[in-house]
Amino acid sequence: MKKRIPLEEGDYYLTPEGYKCFTAQYHLKRGHCCKSGCRHCPYGYDKKRD
């Protein structure tokens, strides 16, 4: 079972289309890279390169 991380201010913003976009702050709290090619990945993962 995955641990749920409570959202705090600065963890995401809404795109013009209305989607949640998680920030590097949130990804660091999560503690690992999901290898989904997230826009603000602090772990350096690049879907095109890796």
Image (spheres, rainbow, N blue to C red):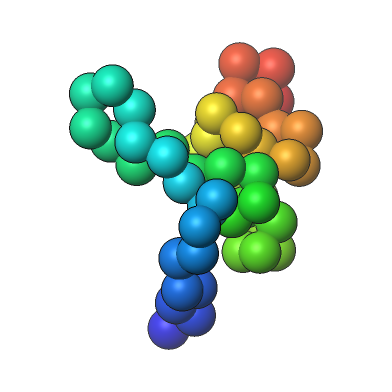
Q: Residue at x 66, y 64 (%)?
A: 29
Would residue 8 appear left or right of 35 to someone viewing this image? left
Q: Residue at x 42, y 40 (%)?
A: 13
Image quadrant in which the C terminus is located: top right
Image quadrant in which the N terminus is located: bottom left
Residue at the outermost top position = 48
Above/below status of 27 relative to 48: below
At which x and y percent is residue 2? 46, 77
Whether residue 35 is visible to the viewer of this picture, yes or no, is: no
Residue 43 position by quadrant: top right
At which x and y percent is residue 9? 50, 57
Above/below status of 31 relative to 12: below
Q: Who is closer to the viewer here, 29 or 36?
A: 29
Whether residue 25 is visible to the viewer of this picture, yes or no, is: yes
Above/below status of 12 relative to 32: above
Above/below status of 50 relative to 12: above
Q: Count the labels in the image.
A: 0
At which x and y percent is residue 47? 59, 24
At which x and y percent is residue 14? 34, 36
Residue 15 position by quadrant: top left
Residue at the outermost left position = 17
Q: Residue at x 70, y 33 (%)?
A: 45
Would residue 3 appear left or right of 49 to someone viewing this image? left
